[in-house]
Image (cartoon, rainbow, N blue to C red):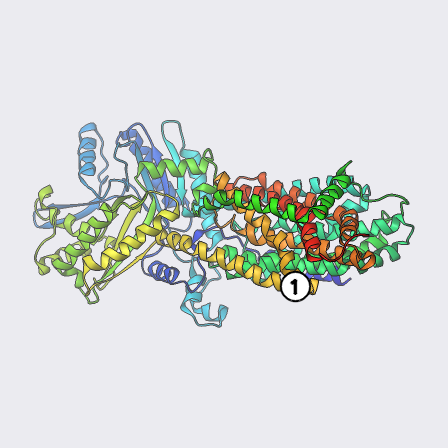
Amino acid sequence: MLSISSAIALSSGLGNLTADFDDDGFLRAGDDTLAVYDAFRARYGRDDRILVGIEAPDIFDLQALVRLRDLHEAIEQDVPHVAEVMSLVNARDTRGDGDELIVDELLDPWPNDALELAIVERRAMLNPLYLNTYFSHDGRFAAIVVELDTYTSLDNFDSDDVEHWFPDDSAANKTEAEYLSATETRQTIRGLRKLIKKHQSPEFRLDLVGGAVLSQYMQEISTEDVRLRTMLSVLLIAVVLLALFRRISGALLPLLVVSLSTISTFGAMGWIGVPFTIVTQILPSFLIVVGICDAVHVLALVYQRLSAGDSRDTAVSSALGRAGLPIVLTSLTTAAGLFSFVAADITPVAEFGVAAPVGVLLALFYSVTLLPALLVISPWTRASHGQRVSTPNGVSGILLHAGNIATTHPRGTIAVVALLVVAAVPGVSALRLSNDNLAWLFEDDPMRMSIERIDRAFEGTERLEILVNTRRENGLHEPDHLRRIDSVVEHVMGTTVERVEIGSGLSIVDIVEEINQALHENQIESRTLPNDRRLIAQELLLFENSGTDDLEDVTDSRFQEARLTFQARIVDSMYYVPFIHSLESALPKILGPDIAVEITGKMALRSRAFAVLLGSLLRSYGLALLIISPLMILMVGSVRRGVISMIPNLLPVYFVLALMGWLDIPLNISTMLVGSIVIGLAVDDTIHFVHGFDRHLAECGHPATAVRRTLETTGRAMLVTTIVLCVGFFVLLFGSFKGTIHLGILAGSASLVAFLADVIVAPALMMLAHPTRQEA
């Protein structure tokens, strides 16, 4: 009854579960880079624009422009939560007419014939601010830039109520409460998709790209993947359990328990505010296999006692008496290994370190409460004399043969393993880190192809933002300050570090030069910075009075701070790190000590996320060892034997890292999970082996005999759990994300290595740990 009540209470939290696939959330609250970005976003709005890429034979063809206008206007009218729509249709056109400054739109009035269209095209080609923003170099691509609302417009939102929502009066909490919600962003993307489907044609090809679009796409794909993988896991594991136990209860009852555990875990995530992310989306498959492994050890002993003629009550109580302590210990070590991820500086990984241990402990709770109750009352649980857990023909013999080799030649066994460790060094040395969003998708994925096409056409869609603060009001009226800002733009545009290349840049300097050209009879040679402070101030005042608010995008109201925006090609974030470092070193020297500079934007966020990846990895793995090693020592009752027992648990991690190097699988926010997951799961079999070994050693007094008896009994359950783990992890191969597929390959392979280590290396180590005791 307690189990059912707990399941109902936890499952009710499913309605609170949210999804977050936006890489804004990679960095943890309090990170300095994230704080700078949040402050930037509060001042200037979102920098993660949505782009509608348009490919046509000639974008300046009149028919193409008409279709562009129709789509532009439809977005303005029909798509919700849009702050601004920009394209060639309403691109700012600044020109002079005598002493008058005219700020109008490029296509107003609309061209009606070839001559007027030629004039418009010439004006566009001569305006450097249009290139790679509204059209590409070759004139085959155009873009509609869609800026989303920064803050929510929900009917029940009132900024005055923020303090009521968050008793903590922090600015961070208030800002987070006001941002556009995931539901609203989803509504915007759906509206854009609907329009694109309507306006798409072979001669007018449309691509929808942008950070919000990619996040929504990955969320949708992930949801479908989770459904598919969960069904496959349940089906395949049911087949495995039926084949092994040859009983309906052997398949049905464990799956019922793990399904309840998984649902309860996601409900708990809803209650504690842990979202569904690119990392936590592996939880269903993971929790199913972990819960099944707990149940297998109980079921194997229950069916063994039933086959011996015990009643159901006696069989269940006997099974819990023998398997209860190892199951509790294995669950604690698995949870401990997963809990190590809370030390990660990458939020989705840290959240996994909260949700996964909760799921493991819930699986333990249901396995020792609900499963025994179901076994007692189930009509499918009946005695079947003489029936044991079924294993494939010859497997038991192979296990015993492996154990015999290890006990007969323990030093030779360890020597061979040591040689394998040395042979794996080149693989470990080839290991590399990565944080590439696009690399999660396959090369032929439609979304990835769209992103790469538009990124290539416009020479970059990644955003780098630089804030230059003159530290005094109207500091941007100073010609010297503007020249230094222009030098920053030239430096950034000319800097190439690793694979990072800047395609275009925009600052207040461009607007001042644009105004100056317009007021000097639109002569291209006058597109320069004035040398007079008063003239700059007058030109900016004229621009403001023209009716445009475009200055708000490049400076603050006091003309103290300048915003410099750059577009770069999308590459692995590992290349952003040295690029950002080079700018952090060079820009203060260019600007001088009297001007402050901050680097932010999506590129800076991804650079920082990559920079903390290695530290998160080392802390997580180190914490896992610090937590699990003492538990192992306490379990075996000896520091020496506890340390020795950890060796078979570290070998799978080491060989998996080598496998990653050989297969060129990088360490990223997905594959970094492998180490701590493997340590936690590998310890499970080791605990069962050592627990069985100690029990048999106390009975017979001979290490080799104890190993053989352990492999004959516990070894069967270890084999079953390994099969279940491999099935559960290899099911991750049925997905759309490379990172998840790689995790499945690595975790499944590690499970096999862990099993081999426990049936070969562990017996050899046990023999060496008892050198004075010989078998009679």
Relative to the observer, which residue lies in front, 651 or 149? 651
**Image coordinates for residue 586, horizontal then vertical, percent:** 23, 55
Instruction: Work out which quarter of the rendered image holds the N terminus and state it.
Output: bottom right
Q: Tell me the residue that label 1 is attached to.
A: 633
Q: Can residue 71 be seen in this snapshot?
A: no
Amino acid type of the residue that numbered disc 1 sits on in the rendered structure:
Ile
Relative to the observer, which residue lies in front, 705 or 376? 705
**Residue at the (59%, 58%) spot, across then down:** 337
Relative to the observer, which residue lies in front, 31 or 211? 31
**Image coordinates for residue 768, horizontal then vertical, percent:** 68, 54
**Image coordinates for residue 647, horizontal then vertical, percent:** 61, 54
Q: How many marks?
A: 1
Relative to the observer, which residue lies in front, 542 or 580? 580
Q: Is residue 401 above or below residue 114?
A: below
Secondary structure category for the residue under label 1: helix
The quadrant holding residue 385 is: top right
**Image coordinates for residue 755, horizontal then vertical, percent:** 67, 46
Position of residue 109 in the picture relative to residue 427 (left or right): left
Question: Label 1: how many residues lie within 10 Å, few (<14), some (14-19) or many (20+)?
Answer: some
Q: Is residue 710 above or below residue 397?
A: below
